[in-house]
Image (cartoon, grey):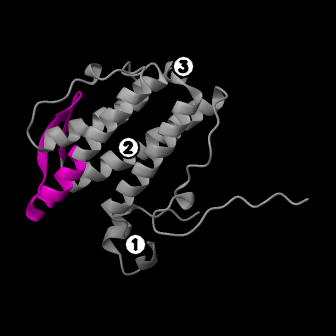
Amino acid sequence: MVVIKYRDLHLNYRRFWRLKMQISLSDLMAYTEWERRKWYQCLRQHGETVLRISVGPHRDDRFESVGDWVRHIFAAEIRYVERLGGRPLTDPASIPNDNIEAIFEFSQRSRKELRNLIETLPAPEWDTPADYKILNYHVKATPRKIVTHVLLHEIRHWAQIATVLRLNGVVDEFHDFLGSPVMGGEWKREEAQK
């Protein structure tokens, strides 16, 4: 088995040029917005009881239910934007975890804030690291890394939520990136053969 370490990729980029790929923040934004629409529809279809499904044991006590986890996705997004802007942090408890409409209205606000940050942050600041206190951690990161983290964080948590829901009998359509409208292409179910 060949193991490729990040430093090898970074130092020997010519050797691994095929592995280098660019994906834009706008691609990740478009994908997460598509995901949000699909999850909003799914949760509305199944009703607010799905928000009370337990997420089971995990590393900390911040979320007990699917509603907590969905709220966390959007609260994390706005709190990172607030950190980058030096503003006071939104208290996640101020957003209900048991109301689909309220959670997704909050998601629109958090996304608007993120989009505004992306559109207004001066270019030289994107790669300037700064220090942040996040939970019990000291973090030094650039706005570019933080914004990328916010979008990947959302993608990762939706996948975890999908698993919890599926294990509890709540099934939805595919949410694969390949099936999204991002970067073009098409994803259609074939008609059943008679």
* Nearest to N terminus: mark 2 or mark 1: 1
Instruction: Say above or below: 184 vs 98.
Output: below
- At label 2, counting other C-alpha atoms closer than 10 Å, the crowd grade (few under 14, some 14-19, many 20 or more) is some
Which disc, if any, is residue 20?
A: 1
Looking at the image, can residue 142 be seen?
no
* Magenta stretch in the rendered image: 113-140
Name the residue that disc number 3 marks: 49
Q: Nearer the viewer, mark 2 or mark 1?
A: 2
Assess whether residue 123 is covered by the magenta stretch.
yes
Tell me the residue at 16%/30% (across/down).
Answer: 89
Looking at the rendered image, the quarter that the C terminus falls into is bottom right
Which disc, if any, is residue 173?
A: none
- At label 1, counting other C-alpha atoms closer than 10 Å, the crowd grade (few under 14, some 14-19, many 20 or more) is few
The residues bearing labels 1 and 3 have C-alpha atoms spaced at a distance of 43 Å
Q: Which amino acid, mark 3?
A: Thr
Q: Which amino acid, mark 1?
A: Lys
- At label 3, counting other C-alpha atoms closer than 10 Å, the crowd grade (few under 14, some 14-19, many 20 or more) is some
Which disc, if any, is residue 153?
A: 2
